């Protein structure tokens, strides 16, 4: 008889646990022949994404979070049209041959295709799904990943807080994702919401933009004509209604990129701000206006689409923010140990 779904799920968790135990035993030491791959290759969509990947790899190796001795490489997919995993694989093989000649054919190679922009998980778009921390445990009700939560804040069940600093007067609803955010004022993040902040660099200046969506919003959906954008939904409300609430005019300039892909991914609706906390406040006000059908004017702000946010992303500043949080958590843990 076939095992029940619950049994299969439990078996997968146990198998994953065993693999993680084996990986933990390899971290920070040189693997013996056959224990690990000889070469690990990660692909990136563009040079800026590759730079972020290399920096994160270097930090993980420096913290001895990865097996040592393997050769780690990040290769950028060729510019131009997307070539798919097949084309990317051929490109990687050429890169390996350029580096190692015929010697690479004797290597055991792990190739991880990670050059996409993660439209289904946009909080991982800027720094890559491959480096996203994963919750492990059962049951998973609420996850806090490398974040600082001040006493007094409230996090709803099923919500994920990652790489964020949450103040004492903040409440987060159920089943939401908050990523890379700094919320230092009284604020309410609604349920079933994705809130993700990015550092960007425009004309040499670091600025901040926070994207906010409903977790059910379809960021991959697009239409070809302006007259069809009434079919797009933002947080369960028609995009046209949202634009009216925000005082944003419907025109060809509303969308970035090719005019044949008009959707939430390319809609210029998120305000550029001078501080991280301000960008979060603005996006929460946008959500609040949609929830309560009340006007919130976006006039006066430079507005970017998610597509443009990724083009202008400042990987260095985002990783700097993450490292500040990481260092603070490490210091707190050391203090707790010394107090015992």
Image (cartoon, rainbow, N blue to C red):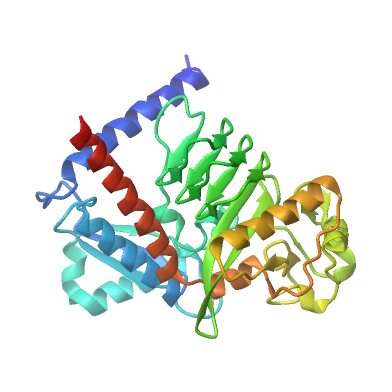
Residue furthest to the bottom in view is 203
Residue furthest to the top in view is 1
Q: Residue at x 31, y 31 (%)?
A: 17
Please tell me which residue lies in front, 128 or 86: 128
Q: Residue at x 34, y 26 (%)?
A: 14
> How many circles with numbers are drawn on the protein?
0
In the displayed structure, 334 sits above or below 207; it is above
Q: Is residue 82 visible?
A: no
In the displayed structure, 317 sits above or below 130; it is below
In the displayed structure, 254 sits above or below 220; it is below
**Which quadrant would residue 272 be assigned to in this image?**
bottom right
Q: Residue at x 80, y 57 (%)?
A: 232
Please tell me which residue lies in front, 328 or 307: 328
**Which quadrant would residue 22 be assigned to in this image?**
top left
Quadrant housing the C terminus? top left
Q: Position of residue 207 (x, y in %)?
A: 55, 72
Q: Is residue 139 visible?
A: yes
Q: Position of residue 94 (x, y in %)?
A: 32, 75
Q: Position of residue 204 (x, y in %)?
A: 50, 84
Please tell me which residue lies in front, 131 or 77: 131
Residue furthest to the right in view is 227
Q: Position of residue 225 (x, y in %)?
A: 84, 70
- Residue 131 horizontal side relative to residue 337, left or right: right
Q: Residue at x 66, y 40 (%)?
A: 192
- Residue 230 horizontal side relative to residue 35, left or right: right
In the displayed structure, 14 sits above or below 288; it is above
Please tell me which residue lies in front, 133 or 9: 133
- Residue 146 horizontal side relative to residue 164, left or right: left
């Amino acid at each position: 008889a076939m095992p029940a779904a619950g049994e299969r799920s439990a078996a997968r968790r146990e198998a994953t646990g065993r693999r993680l135990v084996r990986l933990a035993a390899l971290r920070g030491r040189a693997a013996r022949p056959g224990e690990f791959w000889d070469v690990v290759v990660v692909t990136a969509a563009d040079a800026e994404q590759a730079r972020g990947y290399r920096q994160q790899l270097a930090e993980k190796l420096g913290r001895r979070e990865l097996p040592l001795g393997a050769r780690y490489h990040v290769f950028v997919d060729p510019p131009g049209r997307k070539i798919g995993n097949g084309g990317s694989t051929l490109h990687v093989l050429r890169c390996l041959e350029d580096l190692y000649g015929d010697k690479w054919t004797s290597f055991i190679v792990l190739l991880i295709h990670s050059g996409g922009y993660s439209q289904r998980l946009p909080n991982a778009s800027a720094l890559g799904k491959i480096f996203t921390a994963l919750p492990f445990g059962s049951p998973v009700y609420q996850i806090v990943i490398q974040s600082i939560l001040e006493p007094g804040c409230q996090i709803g069940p099923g919500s994920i807080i990652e790489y964020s600093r949450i103040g004492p007067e903040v409440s987060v609803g159920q089943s939401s994702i908050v990523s890379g955010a700094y919320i230092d004022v009284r604020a309410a993040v609604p349920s079933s919401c994705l809130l993700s902040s990015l550092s960007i660099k425009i004309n040499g200046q670091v600025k901040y933009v926070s994207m906010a969506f409903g977790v059910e919003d379809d960021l991959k959906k697009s239409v070809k004509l302006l007259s069809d954008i009434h079919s797009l939904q933002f947080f369960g409300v028609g995009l046209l209604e949202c634009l009216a609430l925000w005082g944003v005019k419907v025109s060809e300039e509303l969308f970035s990129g090719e005019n044949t892909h008009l959707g939430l991914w390319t809609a210029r609706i998120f305000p550029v701000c001078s501080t991280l906390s301000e960008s979060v406040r603005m996006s929460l006000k946008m959500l609040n206006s949609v929830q309560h059908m009340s006007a919130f004017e976006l006039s006066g702000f430079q507005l970017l689409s998610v597509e443009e946010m990724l083009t202008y992303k400042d990987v260095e500043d985002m990783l700097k923010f993450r490292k500040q949080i990481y260092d603070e958590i490490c210091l707190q843990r050391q203090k707790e140990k010394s107090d015992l």
